[in-house]
């Protein structure tokens, strides 16, 4: 039987990356083992940290690794930065109930981000040959996923009103000369909570979820 039920977690406090990573792994392991049939959607903000994907190049870190929290994790993609003012969305999702195709899943996430931004009348697009979403030549959203036995982990981040100078300490996503943007550069009245509501709504529509709390 196809399961369309997902736990939804959207903490008000700013979370440490490692705590939420452990939570994702618990849900992923539960789905893989069959001990649980609950997907997980987590929406929130992180304390400042940097994460490196499986095949990332450490030369894209432009600082000594003891200056900030740095995590090497089980997702694709290169280095990125998380911080307050950036909305992070994690999806621990059983693709056996959807489509066992990671390209489909990545394009689905891009579609969700584009729908979110367009709901605020912000023109944006995916860029051929890259994963993520851009406003013109500036990157507004980054995507990095992991998958084990067709159960996903990690997800995407949207810069809402974060300190973009934190990206100056890396080569974002391994793209030389990559310029980052905030949503407030284009709609100054936006905040993370407002964007969070729309992300939740569109994810629910796109994956036909029934959201429940624990």
Image (cartoon, rainbow, N blue to C red):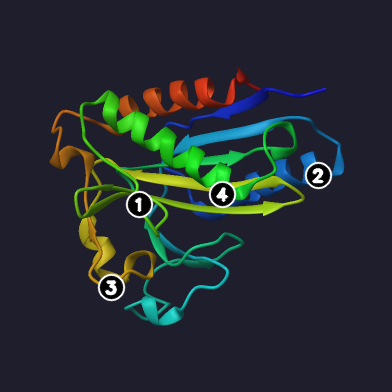
Q: Earlier in the sequence, mark 3 or mark 2?
A: 2
Q: Which of marks 1 and 4 is nearer the N terminus?
A: 1
Question: Does 138 sit left or right of 7 as displayed?
Answer: left
| Residue at which label 2 appears | 32
Q: Which residue is drawn at 86% across and 36% down?
A: 35
Q: How crowded is mark 3: few (under 14 residues within 10 Å), some or many (20 or more)?
A: few
How far, Cα to Cα, is label 4 from label 2? 21 Å
How far, Cα to Cα, is label 2 from label 1? 30 Å
Foreground mark, 4 or 3, reads 4
Q: Earlier in the sequence, mark 4 or mark 3?
A: 4
**Residue 210, position in %: x, y?**
62, 17
Q: Which of marks 4 and 2 is nearer the N terminus?
A: 2
Mark linked to residue 103: 4
Q: Please tell me which residue lies in front, 142 or 42.
A: 142
| Residue at which label 1 appears | 83
| Residue at which label 3 appears | 176
């Amino acid at each position: 039987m196809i399961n369309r039920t997902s736990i939804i977690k959207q903490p008000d406090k700013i979370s440490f990356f490692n705590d939420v990573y452990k939570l994702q792994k618990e849900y992923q392991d539960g789905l893989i083992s069959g001990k649980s049939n609950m997907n997980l959607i987590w929406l929130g903000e992180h304390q400042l940290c940097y994460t490196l994907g499986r095949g990332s190049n450490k030369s894209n870190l432009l600082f000594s690794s003891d200056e900030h929290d740095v995590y090497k994790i089980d997702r694709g993609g290169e280095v990125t930065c998380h911080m307050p003012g950036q909305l992070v969305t994690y999806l621990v999702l059983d693709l056996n109930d959807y489509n066992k195709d990671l390209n489909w899943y990545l394009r689905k996430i891009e579609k969700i981000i584009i729908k979110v931004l367009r709901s605020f009348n912000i023109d944006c697009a995916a860029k051929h040959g890259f994963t993520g979403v851009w406003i013109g030549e500036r990157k507004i959203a980054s995507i990095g996923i992991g998958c084990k036995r067709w159960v996903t982990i990690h997800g995407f981040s949207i810069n809402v009103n974060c300190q973009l100078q934190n990206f100056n300490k890396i080569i974002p996503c391994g793209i030389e000369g990559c310029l980052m943007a905030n949503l407030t550069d284009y709609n100054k009245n936006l905040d993370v909570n407002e964007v969070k509501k729309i992300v939740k709504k569109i994810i629910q529509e796109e994956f036909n979820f029934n959201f429940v709390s624990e």
